Structures are given as C-alpha cells and as structure tokens.
Image (cartoon, rainbow, N blue to C red):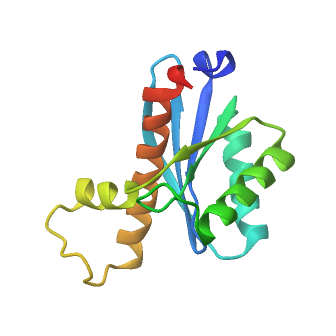
C-alpha cells in the first residue's frame, strides 16, 4: 500500500456516464464504506460535488475503477475512465490509482438485492445504491491488494 494511504483517507469512484458512485475508507483500517452517488451527466456538477467531498474528507489518494472486458481488454468506457482519473488528478492534485473493476456492478447488485432478476428494470435510486456499492467494492479491492502493486 502506498505510504501516504497507509495513514490517510482514500476515496474511491465507480465512474459512469450518468452516475458516479463514491466510497471512502481509512488506510490504517483498510476498510471501505459507501459514501454517496453523484447523479448528474454534467461535468461541472460532477466535479463540483467531488470537490465538496474532497474538501470535507481530505483524502490522501483517489481510486477509480477501470472497466475492462471479461478478457481484460479495454473498451470505450475504459478510455472515459482514464480521462476521468486524469481530470481528478489534475483538478485536485491528488494521486489517483486505477483498479480493475470487472464485475463489480454485478457483485454490488448481488450484495444489495440477490433476488433481482437480471434484465428487469431498476429504479433510479436502486441504480444509485448499486453504483455506490460498486465504488465500495472497488476501494475495498484496492485496500486488499494495493500492497502487492
């Protein structure tokens, strides 16, 4: 685990074109928890909300989930997430790590509602909870595996 994260707060993100799930954790404890979901397609609103969270929580590091195909190949959202990570780093002057997020949304949906049938519609609030839970899973994965990176 990077030294600055070992004793500080780390904020994790599950990036999407409509919503961004956000999680928070303390490096010393190595435990992530759901924080919120930012629900806006507008970049100004998104970064404004992220800026407020960063001001409030003062993270030492940020973690962004990187979507890949099941085979580990990049796709359209991979480039968007990389751009989002670069924007975070540039705007907030914090180190940003990328974490493979394959299947985190599926795992999050299962954790929150194991009875939901795939393909059936979800409410907006249910989708927001899934995005925040996915951010928690991404950040927890970073805590669990960062020491090997």
Please say whether residue 59 is visible from this viewpoint. no
Residue displayed at 29% across by 61% down = 109
Where is residue 71 shown, x and y percent of the image? 43, 58
Please say whether residue 103 is visible from this viewpoint. yes
Classify residue 54 by image quadrant: top right
Task: Examine the rendered structure and indicate whether residue 75 appears above or below residue 149.
Answer: below
In the picture, measured across the screen, residue 92 lies left or right of residue 145, that is: right
Classify residue 106 by image quadrant: bottom left
Task: Examine the rendered structure and indicate whether residue 102 appears above or below residue 121.
Answer: above
Where is residue 87 shown, x and y percent of the image? 80, 54
Q: Quadrant of the C terminus?
A: top right
In the picture, measured across the screen, residue 109 lies left or right of residue 78, that is: left
Q: Quadrant of the N terminus?
A: top right
In the picture, measured across the screen, residue 43 lies left or right of residue 125, that is: right
Classify residue 40 by image quadrant: bottom right
Between 82 and 33, which is closer to the camera in this rendering? 82
């Amino acid at each position: 685990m990077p030294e600055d994260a070992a004793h500080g707060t780390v904020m994790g993100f599950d990036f999407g074109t409509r919503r961004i799930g956000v999680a928070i954790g303390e490096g010393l404890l190595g435990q992530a928890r759901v924080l919120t979901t930012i629900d806006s397609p507008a970049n100004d609103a998104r970064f404004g909300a992220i800026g407020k969270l960063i001001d409030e929580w003062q993270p030492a590091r940020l973690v962004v989930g990187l979507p890949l195909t099941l085979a580990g190949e990049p796709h359209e959202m991979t480039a968007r997430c990389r751009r989002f990570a670069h924007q975070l780093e540039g705007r907030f002057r914090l180190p940003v790590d990328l974490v493979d997020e394959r299947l985190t949304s599926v795992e999050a949906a299962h954790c929150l509602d194991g009875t939901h049938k795939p393909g059936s519609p979800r409410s907006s609030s249910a989708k927001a909870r899934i995005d925040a839970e996915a951010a928690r899973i991404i950040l927890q994965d970073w805590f669990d595996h960062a020491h090997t990176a």
